[in-house]
Amino acid sequence: MEQYKKEVGQRVLTIFESRVSKKLFEDANVNERLARASLLVEENPFVTNPFRRYGILKQGESNIKILNAFQPNLWAQDFAFTEKKLDKMTVATAVERAEASAWYTLENYQNIRQVLKSAGVSQYQFIRAFIEAALIESAYYTRLSGAELTDAVKKRIDIALMKRAVRDKSTFKTVLTQLGVNDRDNEALFQFTTEMELTDVLREFIIVDPYYNRRAAHIDQFKEINSQRSVQLEHTKTPLFAEKLLGKLISKYPGAARKMLKAKDAS
């Protein structure tokens, strides 16, 4: 299996590199893609959202049937790491990485072609969905890596982080309810994440992420990290993260924290 992953990763990396040019790393392109990624992620906080929007997945349907479509992308990153070429896989080249992975998947994964046929979706819609998913993924880790971003881009990504947190972790929902924050109000979510320093809390947990550790040298230089496992932000589901969040709540909103703790003790 490991040899197979390596072969797939090498093939996708080759396709990817054939699409990459120096021009992609110029500030104009990087800024354009960051802006595009932040707009996408604000309204689509999960990487599977584009696949639902294009009709590849139905609303509420599990993503299990397309999970293997993400394998070439991840294996290409793993192979690029071993070849010391992961520095090319930044937000600047997210589109090219997505295209290379998507085309490989379409050519080699019969089940994905069948999924598209059954859904009445074209290959080009699948590629567009894959590109959007890659940009969403890139938006998160560009922000969490500490990269310098415009205020507008940071705001959009922070709102998306809050939307993910509210969806993934009931603790967040409870906190927002206690504070009277409308989790459907983007401005309210942004104000909350700013006051709670949520992005800083999440960055503390990224440090222990195995994908971050493997890519740390590249993160510092290129401010980017990509992986399906990491982008799920599993750290927000741990007891330690909930404890950290409550610590922030106690220091900033002691009244709400007492209500939460009282309710927890009574349950």
Image: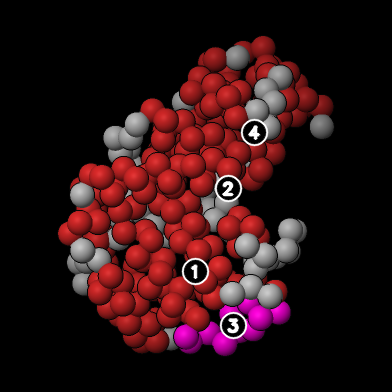
Q: Residues within 10 Å of mark 3 (few under 14, many from 20)?
A: some
Dot 4 surroundings within 10 Å: few (below 14), some, or many (20 or more)? many
In the figure, residue 204 lies in which quadrant?
top left
Quick one: label 3 or label 2, which is nearer the N terminus?
2
* Residue at mark 1: 127
In the rendered structure, which amino acid carries the disc numbered 2? Answer: Asn
Q: Which mark is residue 44?
A: 2
* Residue receiving disc 3: 113
Which amino acid type is shown beneath numbered disc 3? Answer: Arg
Tell me the residue at 64%/58% (across/down). 53
User: Which quadrant of the view contains residue 190?
Assistant: top right
Q: Nearer the viewer, mark 2 or mark 1?
A: 1
Q: Is residue 223 visible?
A: no
- Relative placement, left or right, of 247 versus 185 is left
Q: Which residues are magenta?
A: 107-118
Residue at 57% from the left image edge and 51% from the top image edge: 46
* Residue 214: image location, x then y, percent: 30, 59
Q: First in sequence: mark 4 or mark 3?
A: 3
Q: Residues within 10 Å of mark 1 (few under 14, many from 20)?
A: many
Q: Residue at x 64, y 33 (%)?
A: 172
Cα gap from disc 4 to disc 2, whole angstroms:
19 Å
Q: Residues within 10 Å of mark 2 (few under 14, many from 20)?
A: some
Q: Nearer the viewer, mark 4 or mark 2?
A: 2
Compare marks 2 and 1 and give the one earlier in the sequence: 2
- Pick the front one: 154 or 198: 154
Q: Nearer the viewer, mark 1 or mark 4?
A: 1
Q: Position of residue 171 (x, y in %)?
A: 66, 35
- Of 228 and 66, nearer the camera is 66
Give the secondary structure at mark 2.
loop
For label 4, the residue is 172
